[in-house]
Amino acid sequence: MDFDLNEDQQAVLESVERLLAQHAGPARAVALNRAGDYDHDLHAALEAAGFNQIARDLARDDTLAGLEAALTVEAIARSGGVVAAAAQMLVAPALCERTIEGPVAICTVGELTQPTPVRFAAHARSLLVLDDGDAYLVSPAPGTFEPVRTSFGYPMGRLSEGASVEPDREGQALGAGAADTLRNWWRLGLAVEAVGTMDAALGHTVEYLRQRRQFGRTIGSFQAVQHRLSLCAIEVEASRWLTREAAFHNAQPEAVAAAAAYALQAADTLFTETHQLSGAIGFTCEFDLHVWSMRLLALRQELGGVGAARRALVEARWGAA
Amino acid sequence: MEFNWSPEDIEHRREIREFLDEELPDNWEEISQHGPGGDSQAAFSRQFCGRMAEKGWLTQHWPGEYGGRDCEPWRHSIVGEEMWAIGEPRGSQYMNVNWIGPAIMHYGTQAQKQLHLPKISAGDVLWCQGFSEPEAGSDLAALRTRAERIGDNYVINGSKIWTSYCNHADYIFLLVRTDPSSSRQQGISVLLVPMDTPGIEVREIPSVVGERYFHEVFFTDVTVPASVLLGEENNGWGVVNYALQFERIGAARYARAAVTLDRLAEVAAERGMLDDPIVVDRLGEARALCEAARVLVYKVIDLRAKDQPPTADTQLARVLSTTCDNAIGRLALEIFGPESREYASYADNNFRLAMTAGVAVGATEVQLNLIAARFLKLPRE
């Protein structure tokens, strides 16, 4: 057991944070979100620096470097990066033997049969589809998905009327067991993104409450406010360490279900509390909280959210649900 | 960063489980129904800790010079998890090995070390902690119990409250005010007082938690030699802070909660309750909470294993660990339903032993204050 980053992990994190300082950040996220755009520049920069393949490149003895990839995705989420980092860096390497073309989006087959907005689908070159006991890879032609306006902080797309998606003709390696693999790594990705996003939302709120004065004192000095923030901090830290542990164990089903069950519940708490404590300014576009807070609610909607994660946890732990 | 147990640690956990299988009698559940402070468990702990000492496991995390084996805190945490999970057969002696012994090692005189450490590591001495007072609960620094230096003695007058384990204890780790003109954290000292000293009276405070759980301890002109002073006079606050960094996560509450929860899931399955999606949801939520508490406690053990000073991580872990204990205690009542109405039923025992978690060793609100100040760096004003 060791909760400190080793030298290699430290180097990975510093390097991605340097890149993000240059290519990402809340202002950029706001501009991209307004246009419903994907951050192709950030995606390309991550690709060029080797981060998109990090899980495979740092693999040892054929074991994916899930933790290093998760640390990278967590940092990208913290920066508000508008890229499909979890799908690209965590899910795709676990599922596909060859490198698939990004951006990568993920959805359930239900989101195609009853078309609903799917994160990153309008920009995706590869789409991973979970169909109950099966999983398949699709390379959607341009126009297959139409952009959808959303309140929830990520570019989204919906299957266009009359369009359909078929399993990739190359049918790459999404055979037996692929559905479970997809489910577990997707769930891990959601937890990791939630952690980075909650971290930033709480940090932004705490910073504001250290400055903002009302009733002749800083709001952050009121005990009623402090206790709520302290409880939020506990939620974020517990989510962070559960998730990192699950990533280290490469999305082992019980570990990842626990991490997602906890982190996605925490995401609801963090959304509610950061907005409540930030007051009216928290709802405005000039205050960056929304860059992270709105995303938390989108993350909670994927793969059955908290309820499905808890069911998966009960099944993994006790063999029944 | 990595999250694997070493093969040696995995083997040690197996050994401990095997040992528990052999040592715990068939009526262990009955013996342990009133918790570590109960009469039967206290008596059992002397025999059990003696057996652990023979194995060399009781104080294996202590330095070799004090009879330990210099094992990493991780090794000792495995013992803590396995013991607490099964209802703590070490009784109150978990405190001895977790923090009373280490505090004596750190601050004790040679004579104090020679007197106390061999007894603790042999597993045949019971301690209690004399901290809270009627007017000093969460606000511990308000304590008033007075120890007056007269010649070579201290004369103690005052009272302690909520004291657990004191009805069986051989010694009390006692916080007193030695400087009458002082206030708050200054002027406090720690005395290691034999409980059979004349002038000490213990009265049980009946409570809904269980029998022999809370007590008041009255000190009337209790005279002890000045050699019972631990550390410097009037510097007891430093001693207590040192000691408590070990105590706040000393009891592996999440481990007991996790074992209880496994039993609840088994019962729910047997009774066909898993067809109810609400029950499944509650079980999943509870399991995630146990895991969250565990991983935050591990973060603190990691700091300790690296000999780093304690941080607010201790408070984060403490709050979640007590939340978890409480939540699973209440869930037991729901899963067992009407059966839990009977005193000393499985669910009732678990619930009662968990219900004090958020108040003992510094209420949750005090921990939240510390998180706000130290972890979030929020202003005090």
Image: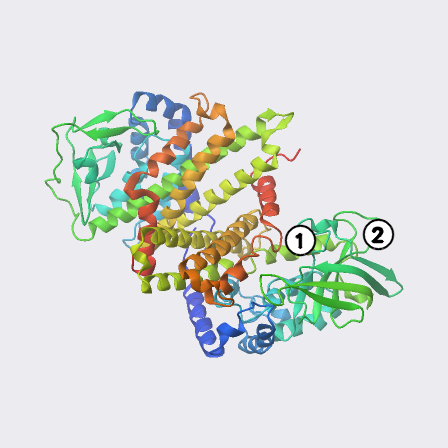
Tell me where residue B127 appears, x and y as whole percent: 66, 68
Residue type indicated by callout 1: Asn
- Rendered image coloring scheme: rainbow
Quadrant in which residue B230 is drawn = bottom right
Label 1 lies in what chain?
Answer: B
Quadrant in which residue A98 is drawn = top left
| Residue at the disc numbered 2 | B180
Which of the two residues, A48 or B254, is positioned nearer the viewer here? B254
**Label 2: element kind:** loop
Crowd class of label 2 (few under 14; some 14 to 19; many from 20; radius 10 Å): few
Tell me where residue B228 appears, x and y as whole percent: 77, 66
Q: Is residue B32 left or right of residue A80?
A: right
- Mark in the foreground, 1 or 2: 2
Residue A276 seen in render:
yes
Label 2 lies in what chain?
Answer: B
Residue visible at 51% across and 31% down?
Answer: A277
**C-alpha span from label 1 to label 2:** 21 Å
Residue type indicated by callout 2: Pro
Crowd class of label 1 (few under 14; some 14 to 19; many from 20; radius 10 Å): few
Which of the two residues, B333 or B247, is positioned nearer the viewer here? B333
Task: State which tag comes first along the sequence, 1 or 2.
Answer: 2
| Residue at the disc numbered 1 | B241
Which residue occupies the extreme right position in the image?
A: B151
**Image position of A111 with respect to B47: above or below:** above
